[in-house]
Image (cartoon, grey):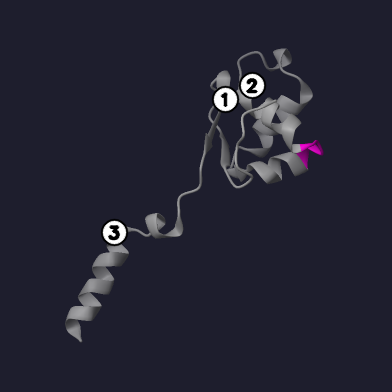
């Protein structure tokens, strides 16, 4: 069984292999789909495979250094420091 990635974890292709013929078609599909950051659930949907099989494929690709899999950041952490400064400036001007 593959690693227990969350359905909302984000998969991003880091690099394409030098010899893509060494990969199975599903590996190549993942690498193409994840050129832009893509949730695990969407990867499974694109592959039309069960989540457990998708997790195995993602584990293989991560082990080979071809993809990164990251947990999504909570919304509060994704707010840029610049926005905090603008809000603080707005509050001070009141």
The image quarter in which residue 63 lies: top right
What secondary structure prevails in the magenta region? Answer: loop
Magenta-span inclusion, residue 69: no
Residue 40 lies, in percent from the top left, at 65, 41
| Mark 3 vs mark 2: in front | 2
Residue for badge 1:
62
Residue 70 lies, in percent from the top left, at 51, 39
Residue 49 lies, in percent from the top left, at 80, 36
Residue name at image x 24 percent, y 66 percent: 85
- Contact, mark 3 vs mark 2 (Cβ under 8 Å): no
Residue for badge 2:
60
Of residues 55 and 42, the one drawn nearer to the viewer in this rendering: 55
Structural distance between the alpha carbons of marks 3 and 1: 31 Å
Q: Which residues are magenta?
A: 46-50
Structural distance between the alpha carbons of marks 3 and 2: 36 Å
Position of residue 83 relative to residue 27, above or below, is below
* Mark positioned earlier in the residue sequence (3 or 2): 2
Label 1: element kind:
helix
Magenta-span inclusion, residue 49: yes
- Mark 1 packing: few (<14 Cα in 10 Å), some, or many (20+)? some
The image quarter in which residue 33 lies: top right
Of residues 71 and 94, the one drawn nearer to the viewer in this rendering: 71
- Mark 2 packing: few (<14 Cα in 10 Å), some, or many (20+)? some
Residue name at image x 68 percent, y 17 percent: 20
Residue name at image x 71 percent, y 12 percent: 22
Structural distance between the alpha carbons of marks 2 and 1: 6 Å
Residue for badge 3:
81
Quarter of the N terminus within the rendering? top right
* Mark positioned earlier in the residue sequence (3 or 1): 1
- Contact, mark 2 vs mark 1 (Cβ under 8 Å): yes
The image quarter in which residue 44 lies: top right
């Amino acid at each position: 069984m593959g690693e227990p990635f969350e359905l909302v974890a984000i998969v991003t292709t880091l690099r394409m292999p030098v010899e893509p013929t060494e990969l199975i078609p599903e590996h190549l599909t993942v690498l193409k789909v994840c050129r832009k950051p893509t949730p695990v659930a969407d990867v499974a949907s694109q592959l039309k495979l069960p989540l457990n099989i998708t997790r195995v494929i993602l584990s293989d690709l991560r082990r080979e250094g071809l993809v990164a899999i990251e947990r999504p950041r909570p919304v509060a952490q994704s707010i840029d420091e610049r926005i905090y400064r603008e809000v603080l400036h707005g509050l001070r001007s009141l």
